[in-house]
Amino acid sequence: MEMKKNYLKKYKILFQNNMKNKIFIFLFTFFVLNSYSQNSGQINGDFSLNLQSYVEDEAINAQAADEVVLNNAFLNLLYSNNNLTIGLRYESYLNALLDYDSEFRGNGIPYRFATYTIDGLEITAGNFYEQFGSGLIFRSYEEKGLGIDNAMDGIRLKYKLGKGINLKSFIGKSRTYFTYAEGIFRGADIELDVNETFNIENQTKYILGGSFISRYEERTNPIFEIPQNVAAYSGRLNILSGGWNYFGEYAYKINDPINSLQESEMNYASGNAFTNSLTYSQRGFGVTAEIHRTDNMLLLSERDRTGKAYIMNYIPTLSKPHAYTLLAIYPCATQAMGELGIQLDVFYKIKKGTLLGGKYGTKLNFNFSRINGLEGGNSMLNDNVDFTPKLFDFSEELYYSDINLEINKKVNKQLSYNAVFANQTYNKDFLEGKTPGEYGTINSTIAVIDLSYKIKKGHTIRFETQALFAKQLESASQEEEGDWLMGLVEYTISPNWFFAFQDMYNYGNENKDKRLHYSNINIGYLKGSTRFEIGYGKKREGIFCVGGVCKLVPSSNGLNLSITSSF
Amino acid sequence: MKRIISLFLSILLFHSCEVIEGPYMSGDVNPIDTSNNYVKKVLIEDYTGHLCSFCPDAARELDVILDVYPNAVGLAIHGVNNFTRPYVVDSVFNSDEKYLYDFRTSWGKDLDDFFEVSANGLPKGTVNRIDYSSNGNHRKDFAQWSSLVADELEKEIKFGINIDITQTPLMLSDQFDIIINSEALSSLNGNYKVIVCIAENNITTWQKDGTIDDPNYKHKHVLRSFLTPTWGDNLAGPEINNGDVFSNAYTCIISDLENDNINYSTTLPLGVGNTGQWNTENLSIIAYIYDISSYEIIQVEEKSFISN
Amino acid sequence: MHKKMKKALIIFFTLFFSINTYGQEKSLPNVEVKTLKGKTFNIKNLDNDGSPMVMSFWATWCKPCKKELNAIAEVYDDWQDETGVKLIAISIDDSRSMSKVAPYVNSSDWDYEIYLDQNSDLKRAMGVSTVPHTFLINGDGKIVWNHKGYIDGDEEKLFEEIQNLVSK
């Protein structure tokens, strides 16, 4: 009796301490147990563990971590039963890998939710990810590779209003690391499939959409008026006809000054952005042309903060995401504050049986992109300044350009190759926030040849050779990194094993002491839905980007172990 | 169905938005309450570096805050990192003699390492070191400072600090006696430490400011030295009565402190001891008291060495 | 903090092991994706008239994914003739590269059913952490096998699994 009392007391304390998470775990267990007895629900999830040891290496400026070994891990658990889904994610950073923001520290369950669908209405309570349109005014998403997770916490409703009409609405706060940013977001989105709603039988299909976002944040400022509610809205149109597809979206944000006391920091200008893409494709051929422009269109979850953890809208980078290392050494990142970019992609397959096509055909992908600044910078408005840049001006300072051709060919049953030739221009001073003239603009010519040779059933050897030849377009005060070479050998045995060795060599560095090798060896074992990988070697300091967001990865030297698994 | 539509509509109606028309200055600056002898003051520690191109934005913000809130005290802290390293003396590559001055101090390094500020990107600062957490909540962007300062100044005053600086009337003209009297203004229960440090205002030398290298930049409120250890001297606790007065006395010789920093500089990467030429006219003592359980600074006071 | 986490961990691991012992066949989740024609489609309605389906998560920027799907494309006709299998390719390209999905698919002569999972809702619901990730779904819409990653030759193993399923 006494024991039980104590237990209850303890239980009560525990319960009060962590009400939120506790309730969730209990509900979760309840439903799980329930489901086993009725045998109608199911559970799935995934697990990921990434351990890295850090050894000091003065030559490449790699730091040893005080902790010796660092760890990023998470486990997702989802329970679903007919119309109900419950999920949570346990995350552990003890402490976070050096390429993560150090604010990711400790353990917790920062993600838990329940979703229920009834009569066409879907209700979500807890955390959720959401995107309106292409994300110009709002995108809540996770990108583990970049350490981004701005999941919302709140309530979301989705409703099918009628044939072809979808409504979404939510209220919530956005996650930053293990806490939530101050801004309270309210949002609504409507999408209308015109043909479906009005029963139009037509070859041409129209889809219309509109979104609205508002952020509330209380601010007092003794000098300036600060809007407590900041709104943004967007409209979009998608037209599909035969092989054609047009998508356009325009977004607008009202004044959103930071809470500074300095006149020069105050900007009451509104923001805007548009994106347009036109695609045509048919069998063996496809083309995509895109243009986008942003002006003062950074939307943060907390107005006074800096850093990628607070960005709430998503303006994708208008350049090809490259998978080969040397092609991605100088990556482009979107400037939400102001840029104008164009991109063209052509996909073509040379037919089988032709001279160039060979027995299996040859695939070509040509890509061109060019991004420059706005004339005079972004819009600016306060008591002293009133400036709006020209709408189209392609002659302004170049940020990034890339012209490349990728050839993919299977020569015979054993041999296939992939080759890429590219010429990129990268305004390092601007894109990395350096002083003009410090690193200048780098023009690089890159060649990649990737050969795969099948030795026997299940055994394949692959060779990658990459070279980058850099040229400084203006003289720079800092040492130039110069030319690079890279080689990779990979041996794979299907379905379980892979072995890889790679070396990057910065043989063209202006500083002779920095003409270094960055070698890595990796061994992986895959079984069903589990993957183990162990690697050892040096990583170069670099910028790693996905979409419009980048992170700086410090140089490192050490052992890496990763396990991912799904169930 | 109708209900659901009205639900969506009601959510939409919450979405008021405020487009603000100029003029944007509201102009109603609050007057300061000076009825009490002691007033609550707040310390803003601005972590900075002469190679940090966005740092002057934060420094200018700090300037305005000090103007608007006379009870705010500012301190610019240079840790030991890539933003603060000096350039090499080199007649070819650095013919303009840019960035030769060494602002780094051992105390700046201790604080920067402990609060992990520069490692997470500059400019950032702390306001009375509130919200200390290993997750970095204490690191504040400069646009957050003014509202935090306003909040801090609203808090109840727990200690009053009085700084007394006397120049020793001997031939050693740069020796000073400093007495810090701290008076408890209410009964308190906690452990407190006092920190006494020296700052120099208006050091004119190179600073990266946006896209330009400015040779005539005025570095303000630069941390020069600590008279206490980095984490302070014991003040009082745990039981403190209203009206208790605690006295801490220090003696400093400016040239000795200067030499300490010069010696420290030579132990650092790229350091050649170029950190002298202190101007006593621009020096001030900053004394503050913090709660050792939370690191929160509960009172601060500043006084110039040469007070006329 | 620590106590809470310990408890949570214990619950996780018990769940983890109980799931492993159960090994039940899972259904497709109730998640909406888009077709290349802009239509909304609920993935739980996937159907192949009682024949098996292969669901493969990929992206236009993922080399091994494209390798896998191109390798299957060469033998897809034979697979279909023999087993009636249908391949569902789920693109996780976001708005950066989504507009390139249709041109890439068409120019590559893929005859797969393509869906767009723009904000990774389906990817999360199916516990996919990295691409490529391939699921085999039986005629009743249950997931019976899945495989992470792609190594040259893996498609042969996948085909064996499909044949096993059909001959059952």
Image: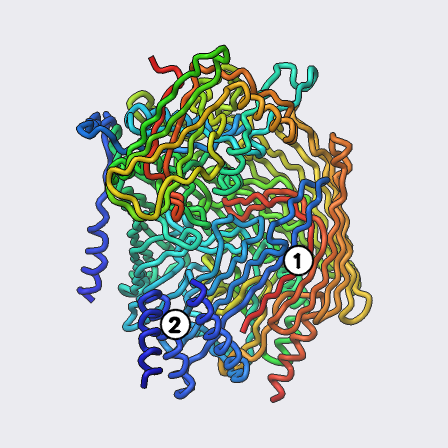
Residue extending furthest toward the right: A455
Q: Secondary structure at mark 2?
A: helix
> Disc 1 designates what residue?
A560
Q: Report if residue B161 is visible in the image.
A: yes
Answer with the quarter of the image where residue A30 lies. bottom left
> Which residue appears at 58% of the width and 22% of the height?
B259
| Nearest to the observer: residue C154 or residue B125 | B125
Q: Residue A391: percent from the left, percent from the top?
A: 41, 30
| Nearest to the observer: residue A391 or residue A376 | A376
Could you tell me which chain the residue with mark 1 belongs to? A
Q: Residue A42: percent from the left, percent from the top?
A: 45, 79
Number of numbered labels in the structure image: 2
Q: Report if residue C102 is visible in the image.
A: no
Q: Secondary structure at mark 1?
A: strand
Look at the picture and state if A394 lies above or below C128. Answer: above
Of the numbered discs 2 and 1, the one sitting upstream in the chain is 2
Look at the picture and state if A239 lies above or below A268. Answer: below
Look at the picture and state if A57 lies above or below B76. Answer: below
Image quarter hosting the N terminus of chain A: bottom left
> Which residue appears at 39% of the width and 18% of the height?
B166
Disc 2 marks a residue whose amino acid type is Ile
> Which residue appears at 54% of the width and 45% of the height?
A551
Image quarter hosting the C terminus of chain A: bottom right
| Nearest to the observer: residue A472 or residue A133 | A472
Q: Residue A420: percent from the left, percent from the top?
A: 70, 46
CA distance for labels 2 and 1 = 32 Å
> Which residue appears at 58% of the width and 48% of the height?
A321
Disc 1 marks a residue whose amino acid type is Asn
> Disc 2 designates what residue?
A25
| Nearest to the observer: residue B218 or residue A393 | B218
Mark 1, Cα crowd under 10 Å, few <14 / some 14-19 / many 20+, is some
Q: Residue A400: percent from the left, percent from the top?
A: 57, 35
